Amino acid sequence: MRLLIHRIFLAVNLLAAGLAGLWHEAGYAAQEEKEPQQAQNTTLLETSVEDLLGMEVYSAARFPQARAEAPSALTIITAEEISLYGYRSLDEILRAVPGIHISYDRVYKYLGIRGLRRPQDFNSPMLLLVDGHRLNDGIYDSAPIGEDFPLDVELIERVEFVRGPGSAVYGSNALFGVINVVTRNPAQSQTHRLHASIGDAEAHRALAQTDVPLGDNAALLLSASYADRVGRDVYVPAFDAPETNNGIAKDLDGDQRRRFMATLTAGDWRFQWVHGDRRKDVPLPIYGADFNDSRNNFRDLHGFYNLSYRTGLDDDWSLQARVSNSYDRYQGNLAYDGVLNLDSSNARRWGAETRLLFEGWPSHRLMAGIELAEDYRQDQLNFDEPPGTVVLDVPYRSQSHGLFVQDEWQLRDNLRLTTGLRHDRRDEEEFFAPRAALVYQPTYGHSLKLLFAKAARAPSVYERFYAVEGYSANPDVGIERSTNYDLLWEAYPTASLRLQLGLQHFKVQDFIVEGVEAETGNIQYVNGKTVRSSGIDLDVEKFWGNGWQTRASFSLQHARRAGGEEVIDAPDVVYKFFGSAPVPGSIAKAALEIQGINERHSAQGHAPGYALLNLTLSQLRLCKNLHLAASVYNLFDKEYADPLSLDLSSQGVDQATVDGREFRISLDWSF
Amino acid sequence: MRALRSILMLLLLALPSATRAAALPEAQVKAAFIFNFLLFTNWTADAPPAPLNLCVLGNDAVARELRTLNGRLLGGAPVKVTSVTTPQERNPCHALYLSPAEQTRWPAWLAAPLAQKALTITDSGEKLSQEGCVLAVAVQQDRVVFGLDLAQAERRQLKFSARVLQLAQLAER
């Protein structure tokens, strides 16, 4: 089920409905002023059907319909863009969103939004959904957006990114934003696809997909992939001594992934199984592990079964429901003074959710939902290699529920108010999350949005109970809350130009951060000081005809902590450029991407700014059904590093170097 | 599958035009085509409609272009373009443009009384048919093409002039 999509469609529908009158009158008048277009139109109207059919046409901008009307700051990245820009993983896709930057600690990827990110947070302030199913796990609340994301990018139809709190509909985790990954449905005709790619640092990947129609309205999609990468030797200056291999972590950057997915659709029903298993060697001395010990690695497993149903009960009522079971496992092998320590967690969850939509009252669209979850395993275990001591053994389980209502009220033809409220309870923690959105369309092609929302996140089991050497538990850590104000202006001056200007003010109270326990000097999770972040972005998209297409975004933002402390990994400037064009005489496309940010604070210094340039040539047809794509990432081999967590910086490892120039060539055969 | 097979498709594949003028915006050409196509449609159940009521659902580029055509004369009779908001509206539509972006809402519209005798139209991307739509306007190889579902048309008591039928190639799917 595609809840987010549905929500957006609701917005579109309602707005289309409400604004119809306006376009009919004002819109028509506005159009008449555009004389050249009108003249062309008249000529066209006087053209015979025969001639019309013979004319060469170009597609005017196909901006995602939902964007102008959605009651949120929404960005959509489509499958076409994923292939055009050679994106390999979810984090690379998300990096296309204005103002977003990604950091890497050589195991996991972290998403910074509005300059805000907490080191080692596993993206817990972001809600990650796959077709509406919550992927954040029951131990760390993590949103796996890097190589640990369990789906291949080839299965993604589009990614929707909503900036700002989403708790009023989605509950916990939606503190900074909501990511909904929409996977493609099985095709109605039998097709098979084989895909293979190679990259440098000995990266290999193979993927097989098959679509099987099953009778009248049922179809099955199966997908499996394997990928591995040897990686590079990582140099860590703080460990540059003969006894620690001169600071070189040798052969400790390896990455292996296995992924499976099955989607079965039948009428109003959809069943999905997603499974992703990833093992990454750990080159940095995370948690104080022995440097350059070949046994250091992390393994993450994320998977779920999800059955969803969606139907219209009658003209006025429609229903969506889902039941899911998810499993998330983690095992970290780290050596300490030569002894291998195993840190593991096991999370299982049953989830059920239902939503009702009522459209029986004029000018209103009401939605109500209930969500129940039973986290029946939330176990954390830490022990030294048998027969060693058990350091941590905390089995846990919890229940949570959420209830929400939302109304979209068409106040006038061009004015719509969306209000919503959700109540959530997890164990003894409970919170309310309200939201309000006003969308005003003064004239055709312009929309002005004023958004307000609050969100909250209950602390994760990891944040409350994790206690090993150097870490203390803090069962009393409280809920973190965010409040957000957005003002957005979106304009379509012509059919091929889109402009968006956004202002945002964002506040996080009781932000759960890594702190230092006074008595022991151990790291523990505490509610930190209030963090405020303000920003402005400009996003311009233009379709030039002849297939040329460009988009540029520029974000200025500033995050500050109460008391004047520096916010780590918070760039003040983020800019992006995307351009693509067809290669003459073929169906191939060339695309260029620029990603830039300015200097950031790290725990003990500064990480310099960078600008990266990526080039991709895609859809090169070799013969029938066989296509080639080639990418160069970080073309100018720019050296840069990302700030790291308190844990690593206290060992003198303040920043992690990110790989330089990389190549990838892929072959795609469908039949 | 069965439904698909029963659809009698009339396809018109673009004829390469002799003169290659500069390319025109797709949505404008589609809207102009839809507008002119109405001239070749006969609503056999009623007398020739005046004004001709063209209902538009949604706000995609073609829908926006169609809205600009309100009040224009087509074969001497004015075309009234109505932006429809709910399927419960009383005035029947002679033609109903359904935006592909609104596809989740189509079933309610297709079942509504106002659409029973309507020429249902959509912008179908590259495909030449779309469930529930009599006329599917698409683009293939940079040319506007169209598909007609004659079984649908018959149910809706619609007939088309030989001029547009003659233009078409007969195809079966």
Image: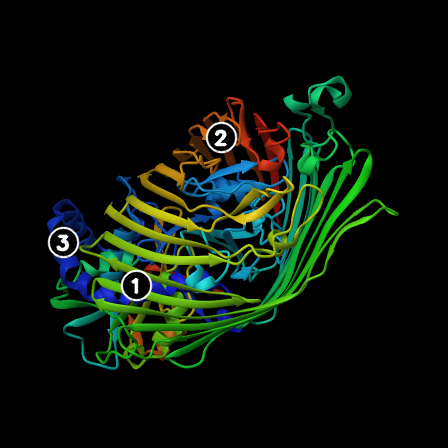
Residue identifier under label 2: A614
Verify CB contact (< 8 Å) between mark 1 and mark 3: no
Q: Chain of mark 1?
A: B
The tag on residue A30 is 3
Question: Is residue B39 in view?
Answer: no
Question: CA gap, disc 1 to disc 3?
Answer: 18 Å
**Three-letter residue code for mark 1:** Gly
Residue nearest the observer in this picture, A304 or B5? A304
Q: Chain of mark 3?
A: A
Residue identifier under label 1: B58
Q: Residue at x 23, y 52 (%)?
A: A445
Q: Residue B21 vs residue A284: left or right?
A: left
**Three-letter residue code for mark 2:** Asn
Residue A228 sits in quarter: top right
Question: CA gap, disc 2 to disc 3?
Answer: 41 Å
**Three-letter residue code for mark 3:** Ala
Question: Is residue A92 in view?
Answer: yes
Q: Residue A386 vs residue A261: left or right?
A: right
Judged by depth in the image, the label closer to the viewer, 1 or 2, is 2
Residue nearest the observer in this picture, A123 or A84? A123
Number of residues whose C-alpha sits closer than 10 Å to that of mark 2, classed few (under 14), some (14–19) or many (20 or more): many
Q: Residue at x 31, y 65 (%)?
A: A418
Number of residues whose C-alpha sits closer than 10 Å to that of mark 3, classed few (under 14), some (14–19) or many (20 or more): some
Residue A254 sits in quarter: top right
Q: Chain of mark 2?
A: A
